[in-house]
Amino acid sequence: MSRHGERPAARPSEQALDRALATAVRRTGAAVGGVYLLDARQQVLCLVATGGLPPEYADPWTRIVLATQDPVADAVREDRLVWVDGLEELARRYPRAAAAQPYRFCMAAAPVCGTDTCRGALLLLWPAGRSPRAGHRERARMTHAAHRISGLLKAAGEPPAIPEQPRVVQVRALDTRAPQAALGFSERLPGGSLALDTEGRVVFVTSGAARLLDCDAASLLGRLPWQALPWLDDPAYGDKYRTALLSREPVSFHALRPPGTWLDFYLFPDPDGISVRVIETALADRPPTLAPVRPPTATGPAGVSRLYRLMHLSAVLTEAVGVRDVVDLVAAEILPAFDAQGLVLSVADAGRLKITGYRGYRPEVIACLDGLPLDTGITPAGKVIATGVPSFVTDPDEMARNYPQAPRISGKQAWAFLPLIVSGRPVGCCILSYERPHTFTADERAVLTSLAGLIAQAMDRARLYDAKHQLAHDLQQALLPRRLPRVDGLDVAARYLPASHGMDIGGDFYDVIRLDHHTAAAVIGDVQGHSAAAAALMGQVRTAVHAHATAGATPDQVLARTNRVLTDVEPDLLVSCLYAHLDLTGHQITLASAGHPPPLMRRPDGHTAPLTVDPGPLLGIHADAVYPPTTVPLPVHTLLALYTDGLVEVPGRETDDTTAGLTDHLARTDVSDLGRLIDDLVHHSWPQGRHTDDIALLLLRTRPRRR
């Protein structure tokens, strides 16, 4: 069913819902309203009814992923009224939404909840000029309207059907009457005049306007301007028109009426509609060159809606870092936006199609498709990459004519094969698939083709990031010990975690050195910076520490001699380091520190605290620096946690507070599994992940020695 075609009659429950929406818009004084319902299977909020705005302009927001950062999604997830007082706050709190809605207005989203869960949301928009603050009475009206809609949904019993396109609710009655005196006044004015209702439909037109627009009045009344006048269906004009509708601010623009007549449009909006003046542009004000005449568009969203949908999706894709991020974002944002159920992202690799991510397919299907040659006859993907021309297949019969095996493999019913091309170079193919036949409109094809370019750019960046990140990781791992030695009387676990952002190599390191049958050394350190130079210096420090430790040097001597090595080579980078000598027979530990955070010690009785270690200066500053040793008892069943500052330096929190919280957590945590304990400690400091610096963590636990 086309967007502008005949729609089936609304059921009684849907009619009641539409009336409740219209009432909510009128009683709150809003300009636009919409009702979203949750598709629980896909976790997507779907716009089922809208009023006060042409349906084309709501197109970019008809489907909102529940997990995304959006006012409507927040209202449902958090079960609260979300109020946004203007464009600046929208851009600050919801940058994705602001990219698709760059207009001055206020908005509110109220959750529509049942007895145990939220089922959707009521969205209301007010134009510019309204007070940015919502008073108690206004909030109460919005909440009451949301509760009324919730009651209607509950009374309907079965879950409401979610339409393919939202129903358009007539918030205010269409009135094409004009008093005779007002009509005479309008007719006597030079140029032409039109009146639009709050949904943008033409409700009044003078003969002068009909003459200037070269269209009879009957063809204009009750229609949206760009429907009756295809030459006005242009993003440049549509943006002005949308500004008047949403922001209720006067705007003006030039437009070319084919073949060569320039017209000036002046739009004067208020809460009841828009008054439009049309006059022929003076010769002196006409643009120096004529703009090309755009052909009439097919059914589908207006050009400006297409533009802002692409802006929104582009903003989403800028958040992708690695290939996995691209797959997740395309699946979360783009599949719901186009009502698709399947996704395959593949790249061209050595003449074959290498699948990098997918959604909505069984693993055995992906196994059949992964690694196919580019000239395969099973899928059009290879041909699409080779030619750079997208392919849209509306049903299995069409696919079977050229690729007989494709429908039998996947069971899908329609496909969009989109080439991913960067600077004329094919990088892969994006496949969107549908579980039922799907007709791709001209505008949908245009949006998907444009979107493929955005995905291609994101995928190219992501593959480069992954390659550099893997190279950095491999180099880092090569410089760290491949395995830690087994020491009688000591359990050991260690982990290096690179920063969540950035591609450079870190300088964090750790090591455990078996000195003899009853002694061992543990070392942890952090080289300043994130670069190849930092990694190289880390390798030098680790080698120097290992050499001096195995030569029999005491902890203070190990750091002092390593420091002299660094000051001789003048690396321009500083290093923190903690060296610990463990006497497993005498049950004591001697430590020396070069400006490194002290380790945490959990004693056999569970008491946990940072060790007091007198630190010396960082390595590489003064050649004659002294590193005083500290010796403390080390009973059996004692746990030591050595770490770099990335574990405790959390933005917005004092390091001492983070360390104290980590200490308290270690005192109350099960320490039987050291590998799991490392994960637990990192999660405690960084519950959301995405730590901003590298983390090295070394755990040592003493146990009875074998006899």
Image (cartoon, grey):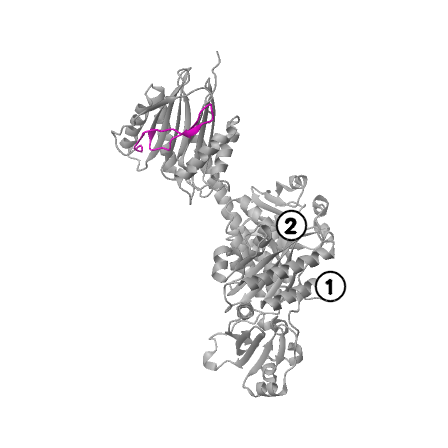
The magenta stretch spans which residues?
A: 593-619
Is residue 605 highlighted in magenta? yes
Is 658 left, or right, of 40 in this rendering?
A: left
Give the number of the disc on residue 117: 2
- Classified by dominant secondary structure, the portion drawn in magenta counts as loop
User: Relative to residue 226, is residue 14 depicted above or below?
Assistant: above
Q: Is residue 506 visible?
A: no
| Mark seen at residue 57 | none
Q: Nearer the viewer, residue 642 or 1?
A: 642
Per the image, the residue denoted by label 1 is: 10
Q: Residues within 10 Å of mark 2 (few under 14, many from 20)?
A: few
Compared across the picture, whether 290 is left or right of 401 comes to: left
Q: Residue furthest front?
A: 136
Q: Position of residue 16 (x, y in %)?
A: 71, 63
Secondary structure under tag 2 reads: loop
Residue at the (32%, 37%) spot, across then down: 573
- The quadrant of the picture occupied by the N terminus is bottom right
Label 1 crowding class (10 Å Cα cut-off): few <14, some 14-19, many 20+? few
Residue 27 in sight: yes
Q: From what the image shows, is residue 148 above or below residue 323? A: below
C-alpha separation, residue under disc 1 versus residue under disc 2:
26 Å
Q: Seen from this angle, which residue lies furthest left?
A: 624
Magenta span has 113?
no
Q: Foreground: 304 or 36?
A: 36
Q: Where in the figure is residue 587, as x and y percent of width and height?
A: 41, 18
Give the image location of residue 693, x and y in percent.
Answer: 42, 40
Kind of residue at badge 1: Ala
354 vs 192, nearest the viewer: 192
Q: Is residue 406 above or below residue 144?
A: above
Tag 1's secondary structure? loop
Select label 1 or label 2 by which is in front.
2
> Residue 676: x percent and y percent?
53, 30
